[in-house]
Image: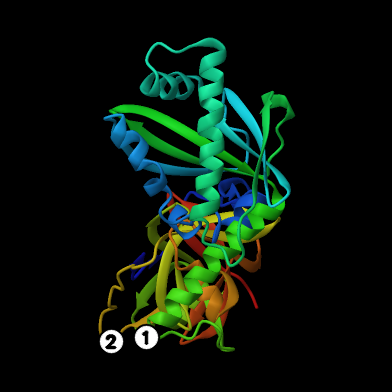
Amino acid sequence: MQGEGRIADHDTAEMIPWDARVALEHVSPEEARFSRGFLRASPGAWCAGLAEHWLPLFYTLGSDLTLRSVQRQFELPDQVFRCTAVEFDGEPGCIGFDARTCRRLAEEIVPGIEGVAADMLLEYLERRLLASLALAWCGSEPLSCSYLGARETSEVVCSGWIGLELELSGIPVSVWFGCGPRALDVLDAQWRARLLESDRERGGNPLGDQIHSVSVELAQLAVPPAMLIDYMRPGTLIDLEVPVSTEVQIKIDGALWAAGTLCQFDGAVAVRIHDTTPEERPHPEATTLVRVQVARTELDEAGIVEHAQVGAILLCDSHVSNRAAVIISGENVASAAVVELDGRFALQILSQ
């Protein structure tokens, strides 16, 4: 994202507008709200040692049970076949299995079982699962779990879903937990609190009152000082010599902090973080660093900790547009329109 750039010839350049409103992916309200907590959390932060409550059973059966991955989403999973209504601290929730998991679990415990007997066995497993959730819960208050019984999937309304993808004796199985809005808020807040606690343990001060300036940058140029006047002249077309994309860098108080993908939420610029350890490239000596800023915002200490996660969504104060600010030594020296030039980004310097 760094080069010298070059002044392009208006007469020969095939310039087209860059429409950010079309180019940028829309972020859902759920992802914008829960990207730093619920969607990033390790299940161990909610229910530590859950597997330990099940290993003795499957050890007795001579079976291996391994957790392969965890999924989180906001819609009822398509594969859910059996839904059982439950309550978490008095709020409706759900436990769901797909058809293969129902068959595999029953067959693993009682080979050949089917019909009503298989349903009874699955109910036992669901009740046992609720009990183990309550025992493994890591919240500051005990978790109350109640079993309500089987439901049609059309009757199930949950705000969030957590899927455990497992392997039972080499065969994939999965279990889904649906939770209501109050439970979703608790899970989200619990993970974010864990992040701040971990930062304090490392010597940080996430509850400090310092506010940091955040800059979202499309590119930066290393320009010889003698050429700056030509670059900043209104009407100048600057070929940034970087391909058109949604990749950006994020700087905090002028220092490179993260890399991400530009997106949009409710008409404002947002960034999905995908790299929290980007490499800073030094600019050549005897050049001036010119930064192309497309959005900005501010973060406090806690915000920096929470956003330092791959997948976190950074919401900015800037509206979605093709405008950029040209920054030199921390000062906004010019405004520009972002355009496309033969598949590359370019800037057209605007009159002040």
| Residue 290 visible within the image | no
What residue would you read off at disc 2? Answer: 286
Circle 2 SS class: loop
Q: Position of residue 198 (x, y in %)?
A: 43, 74
Residue at position x 60%, y 74% from top? 297
Residue 226, by quadrant, is bottom left
Q: Quadrant of the C terminus?
A: bottom right
Q: Position of residue 110 (x, y in %)?
A: 40, 19
Give the Cα separation between the discs numbered 1 and 2: 8 Å
Q: Quadrant of the N terminus?
A: bottom left
Position of residue 132 relative to residue 251, above or below, is above
Contact between marks 1 and 2 (CB within 8 A): the answer is yes
What residue would you read off at disc 1? Answer: 225
Say which amino acid is labelled 2: Ala
Say which amino acid is labelled 1: Pro
Of pointers 1 and 2, the one earlier in the residue sequence = 1
- 218 or 103, which lies in front? 103
Residue at position x 61%, y 70% from top? 350
- 13 or 256, which lies in front? 256
